[in-house]
């Protein structure tokens, strides 16, 4: 491991146990020294603080994997355009970050450590700035999307069809962020629920979360004709172009969305691959997209849709968590596996797949979910 990466990781490790205090100090320092920047952030900062520390953690622990880090930072730099981030803002963020690490490193901080942190941040900022500059030549920082379809599938789940004002390029398995007019500067990620279409229309599956500002708006207060802002497509969960292996897809709730997109991609590609799609939900009513899945199943003989219900004893089909039924269905050794859903569901499913002997490099999920 390069010396600089080791030094940064060791000092960052001291922040992790006090991450809440450290992030609060960072934003306090940033806004105190740059009050105009506060207007770029949402009214409440709870989710923003979590995202910041998640991003910092990923960056720091990827320092000895330059290619992976460069890819992540490039996507991050492009995505930050939608916030109005300019090149001059990076210096202010860097100063607040170094001040934060210095404060919470206690007696271990030295001029040498500061030098390594400054170099690491400068390199990261340069990658983000350059990526943002290149993206600006080809794409807007955000798209205006008009709702052309809104179907309430359950009390708290809706399927939305959205037409961007300009074509928004993405690959099946990716997600994008959404901002509604009701909640300015509050962006929330949602997976795209279909493969790219010629007409450019995007589909989202949204579950209204408790106290979810954006999700509640999208499910309960959005109608055809409304508009919203859309960020660029993000995420690396995609079909392996070099693989022709059969597929296992395990979905929990609205985690179905990106997996449905991958299924559509296989069908349109003309490939002949066996696909097992395990769709887990609490009750039969929560299998909100089963009718559409059955249509896909009838159109593609290689697709087998397996609904699983965990909290309805009278359900006539498979019961339990989605991962509970895997060992009784098939031997998955020669499959590529895709998993999407709530973080806890993904973690449990990954553990179960490990016990079933699935090669880790063949298991794919969106790291944003964890």
Image (cartoon, rainbow, N blue to C red):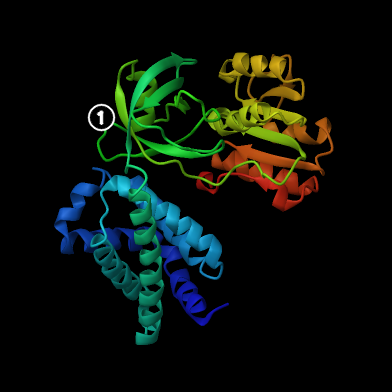
Tell me which corner region of the image, top left, top right, bottom left or bottom right, holds residue 107: bottom left
The residue sitting at 68% across, 34% down in the picture is 249
Residue at the disc numbered 1:
181
Q: Quadrant of residue 161?
A: top left
Q: Left of 349 or right of it: where is 331?
A: right
Q: Please tell me in which quadrant of the rendered image residue 313 appears.
A: top right
Residue 105 seen = no
Is residue 322 depicted above or below 244 in this figure? above
Nearer to the camera, 206 or 343: 206
Can I make out residue 176 in this image?
yes
Q: Nearer the viewer, residue 345 or 273?
A: 273
Q: Where is 61 relative to 157, above or below?
A: below
State left or right for residue 142 relative to residue 76: left
Q: How many marks?
A: 1
The residue located at (50%, 75%) in the rendering is 5
Residue pushed farthest front?
137
The quarter of the rendered structure image containing the N terminus is bottom right
For the residue carrying disc 1, how many other residues have a C-alpha within 10 Å: few (<14), some (14-19), or many (20+)?
A: few
Q: Position of residue 14 (x, y in %)?
A: 44, 71
Question: Which residue is painted at 31% across and 45% down in the image?
Answer: 82
Nearer the observer, 29 or 73: 73
Please state the horizontal and vertical placement of residue 217, each as a whole percent of the image.
33, 25
Q: Position of residue 259 (x, y in %)?
A: 61, 32
Residue 129 is left or right of residue 40, and the answer is: right
Q: Where 240 falls versus 127 (above or below)? A: above
Secondary structure beneath label 1:
loop
Q: Relative to 2, does residue 181 appear above or below in the rendering? A: above
Q: Residue at x 61, y 13 (%)?
A: 291
Residue 262 image position (x, y, % from top left): 62, 33
Residue sitting at the far left: 35
| Residue nearest the observer in this picture, 325 or 120 | 120
């Amino acid at each position: 491991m390069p010396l600089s990466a080791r030094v940064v990781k060791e000092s960052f490790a001291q922040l992790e146990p006090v991450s809440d205090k450290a992030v609060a100090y960072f934003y306090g320092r940033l806004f105190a020294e740059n009050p105009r920047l506060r207007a770029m952030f949402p009214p409440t900062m709870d989710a923003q603080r979590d995202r910041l520390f998640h991003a910092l953690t990923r960056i720091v622990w990827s320092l000895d994997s330059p290619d992976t880090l460069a890819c992540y930072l490039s996507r991050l730099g492009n995505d930050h355009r939608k916030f109005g981030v300019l090149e001059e803002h990076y210096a202010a963020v860097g100063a607040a970050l170094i001040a934060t690490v210095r404060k919470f490193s206690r007696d271990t901080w030295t001029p040498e450590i500061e030098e390594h942190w400054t170099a690491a941040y400068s390199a990261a900022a340069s990658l983000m700035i350059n990526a943002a500059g290149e993206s600006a030549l080809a794409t807007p920082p955000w798209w205006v999307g008009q709702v052309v379809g809104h179907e309430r599938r359950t009390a708290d789940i809706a399927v939305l069809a959205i037409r961007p004002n300009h074509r928004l390029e993405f690959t099946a398995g990716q997600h994008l962020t959404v901002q509604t007019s009701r909640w300015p500067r509050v962006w929330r990620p949602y997976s795209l629920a279909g493969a790219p279409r010629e007409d450019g229309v995007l589909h989202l599956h949204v579950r209204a979360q408790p106290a979810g500002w954006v999700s509640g708006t999208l499910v309960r207060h959005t109608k055809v004709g409304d508009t919203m802002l859309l960020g660029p497509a993000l995420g690396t969960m995609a079909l392996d172009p070099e693989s022709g292996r059969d597929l296992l897809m395990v979905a929990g709730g609205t985690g179905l969305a990106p997996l449905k997109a991958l299924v559509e991609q296989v069908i349109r590609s003309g490939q002949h691959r066996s696909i097992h799609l395990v769709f887990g939900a609490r009750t039969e009513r929560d299998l909100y997209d089963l009718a559409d899945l059955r249509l896909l199943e009838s159109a593609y003989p290689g697709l087998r849709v397996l609904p699983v219900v965990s909290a309805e004893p009278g359900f006539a089909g498979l019961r339990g968590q989605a991962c509970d039924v895997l060992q009784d269905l098939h031997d998955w050794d020669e499959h590529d596996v895709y998993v999407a859903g709530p973080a806890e569901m993904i973690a449990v499913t990954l553990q179960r797949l490990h016990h079933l002997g699935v090669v880790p490099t063949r298991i794919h999920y969106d790291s944003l979910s964890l």
